Each structure stands twice: as structure tokens, then as C-alpha cells.
Image: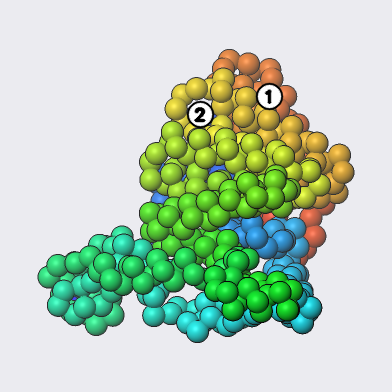
Amino acid sequence: SRSIPAQLTFSPPPSFLKKILSKQTPFSHLLFPRHFNTILLSSPYFRSVFSVLEQMTPVCPFVKATRPDDASSKRSGENICKHAAEHESKAKSESVVSGVIEPKCPLGYDSRSFKIGPLSCVLCKALLFESSKCVPCSHIFCKACISRFNDCPLCGADIEKIEHDEETQKLVDKFIAGHARIKRSPASTDAKEEVSKNKSVIYEDVSLERGAFLVQHAMRAFRAQNVESAKSRLSLCAADIREQLKESGNKPELCSQLGAVLGMLGDCCRAMGDAGSAVTYFEESVEFLSQVPPDDMEVIHTLSVSLNKIGDLKYYDGDLQASRTYYFRSLEVRRNAMLNHHDNASLTLDVAVSLAKVADVDRGLGFEDGAISGFREGVNMLQSLKIDASQVALEQRVCLLGQALLLK
């Protein structure tokens, strides 16, 4: 029989729910960011109850997709499809004007047919990382993925040992290096002569730029708990964006992308237990996101979440004063955003979350009056919310947060 790890679903009893919502539980432990589920939780019950407080939907920083709680899932999907269609239409028009060559990936790695290919791991569904071969069946997987099994997930054969497959990994690395190429100068003399006749030739994938390609694989690997793979892909992506920043200056779009990717790298480090590196990445993420004009809601959210993540790590480390500093900065970012988006229900909930975080730390520091004031303000904001009937997930988050605040 195959030794496939069981995927368990937990339904906590009311007594447990009351316990974790009680006054003895730090509120910072109840709230965590959207982009990645990387908080190291001590109880499986905890995650099943409070994952709805802040939906952790990975949003690619290279695609202007709406957040799930800003509109229905249908509208979000329509926006993504619209963006892809516009991108493809633009690429086709450029091909006529400037001689753009638009190759289709022979292995199917593009947005219209993004699927598991011959260089993918069937377990994490991302490109192979630290390719490892099972003996004796010779099936290949990522090292981190196959290490959890005693039998081959594909054929069921007993795994006698696992060997590193260097040749396959070299092929994967070459594929990544050459895929979704970004504006490279022609290498041959003939090519240069052709460029002089037909303006510039730009080699690029029709539907996926290099950064988005790497981020997609990183998110797939991260969801499958192959954190080393995710970190490796994100590091390549960050290096690419840094190179573009050197060439073109601190453009807001590039700063936004790099800030998001650095935040994801921080999530990877935190999942690996490296809190020091996580803080470094989050702080650098904040630095780049702060350079972007504060008119993009996704950037505002990512910036405030990065600040909260640093605050969380400081909180777990016992540095309450530093934790409060970062929580308060996040609160200010969200409050300033509300001046121009006062009717945004999701943003209002984010402000209430920040108020609760600051108030919780104030209580820990002995500022009881300030803590009570912060909790009350959060409750009042939740009571004033008007939520559309279609925003079920947002309504669940509001209810859970409201219960937690009232118990405080």
C-alpha cells in the first residue's frame, strides 16, 4: 500500500473556540496576512478557524488582479482574463510594428496552457528543484517532495534510496534561464543586419514575462510546502527585477513588483524558521513599496501587511515596543488610504485589524486605557460596515474579528 500523507480537516469544538478567543490569547496570534499561509501555528485547530480572518490568496505582483474580498470571484476572474487578453493583443500589435517574435512554449508553459510538463514535479506541480530519482523505478521528483514518501507516488514501488539527478536539474536550470526572455540583443551579425532593416527584434513570451513565470512556480511550490524551491525561484525573480531597476531607474511598477517578491521571500524564510532573514526581507519590501505612489490599493495592502509581518515577528520575539511601532505604521498606512477610499469595506476591516493589533500590544505594555480605546474603535468600525450579500468571505472575517474584539 502507498504511504501517502493524510490531509486532515479539523472542526474545533465550541470550548476550544472560546479558549483561543479568550483574554489570555494574544490577539496578534489570531490575525495573519493574506499572501502566504506561513505563520507557524501550534495547533491545527487554530488555522481552520482563523484562516478566514485574512484571506491569504497569492496574487501575482505582475498581474493587476483584484483581491477576492473586493468583488465577487466572477468579477475577479473577468479582470484577470481581460488583462491577459489586453496583454496578448498588445503583443500582437507590437509584433507587426517592431518585428517582435512571439514563440509559443513547446512544453506548454504559457498562461493559456499552463500545465504540468516533462520538467515538472507531479507532487508540487512546479518545475523540478533539486531533482531526485527514485531507485529502482527511476521516477523523478523534487527532493523535498519525494522525501516524505516511502513508496513511489506514481507506481507504488518501494523506494530503496533517492539519488540526485544532476542531468535533469541542469536541463531545468537551462530551461528557466531561457524561458520568457526579456529584450536581449541579437548575438549574430546576420541578426544585427536583420534588426537594422526591421527595427528592433524583441524575443518574449506572448503571455508570460519571466517574473510572472517564476512567481507562479514559486507559489505552486510554496503551497506544496516545498519552501526551498519557492525561495530559489523568488530569488531569481528578485535578481531580475533589481537588474531592471539598475537599467531603468526606480520606476513605480518595478518597485511594486520587487516589494511584493521580497515580501514573499520573507514568508519563505519565516516558514523555514529563519526569523532574522524574514525581517530583513520584509523591511526591504517596505522600503521599495514606500517608493510607490499611494494610489494603488494592492500596493497599499501589501505594504501594510509587510509592516504587520515584521510586527508579528517582533511580538513573538518578545519585543513589544518594536512590535507596536510596526503595527502603528501599518495602521497609519491604512488610515491614510481610507481618506480616499472611505467606502471600501475590506480596507475598513484592515484598519480594524490594525487597531486590534496596536491595542493588544498596548495591553501587554500596561497601557490598559489605550488598549480599551483601540478595541472600542475597532468594534465601532465593524458595526458601521455595510457588506454586500455577495461578499460572504468578508462577512465571515468581520464576524470572527467582531467576536474576538468583544471578548477583549
Residue 120 % position (x, y): 40, 74
SS at mark 2? helix
Which circle, 2 or 1, is nearer the viewer? Answer: 2
Residue drawn at (70%, 38%) of the image: 290
Q: Mark 1 points at which residue?
A: 372
At which x and y percent is residue 275? 43, 36
Q: Is residue 189 above or below residue 217?
A: below
Q: What element carries label 1?
A: helix
Check contact, mark 2 vs mark 1: CB within 8 A.
Answer: no
Amino acid type shown at disc 2: Tyr
Q: How is the rendered protein coloured?
A: rainbow
Residue found at the very far top of the displayed protein: 366
Query: For mark 2, what is the residue?
Result: 315
Residue 52 lies in quadrant: bottom right
Regarding residue 262, the answer to whether it shows in the image is yes
The quarter of the rendered structure image containing the N terminus is bottom left
Q: In this view, does 362 lie to the left or right of 107?
A: right
Q: Earlier in the sequence, mark 2 or mark 1?
A: 2
Q: Where is residue 346 in the image (x, y as percent from the top left)?
A: 74, 50
Q: Between residue 52 and residue 150, name the one nearer to us.
A: 150
Q: How crowded is mark 1: few (under 14 residues within 10 Å), some or many (20 or more)?
A: some
Q: Extreme left residue here?
A: 160
Q: Distance between the residues labelled 2 and 1?
A: 19 Å
Seen from the viewer's position, the closer of residues 154 and 242 is 242
User: Which of the pair 221/53 is nearer the observer?
Assistant: 221
Picture residue at 43% right of the left edge, 62% below the top: 221
Query: Camera-side residue: 19 or 147?
Result: 147
- Residue 79 located left or right of residue 310: right
Query: Label 1 is placed on what type of residue?
Result: Ile
Q: Which mark is residue 274?
A: none
Q: Is residue 359 left or right of residue 320?
A: right
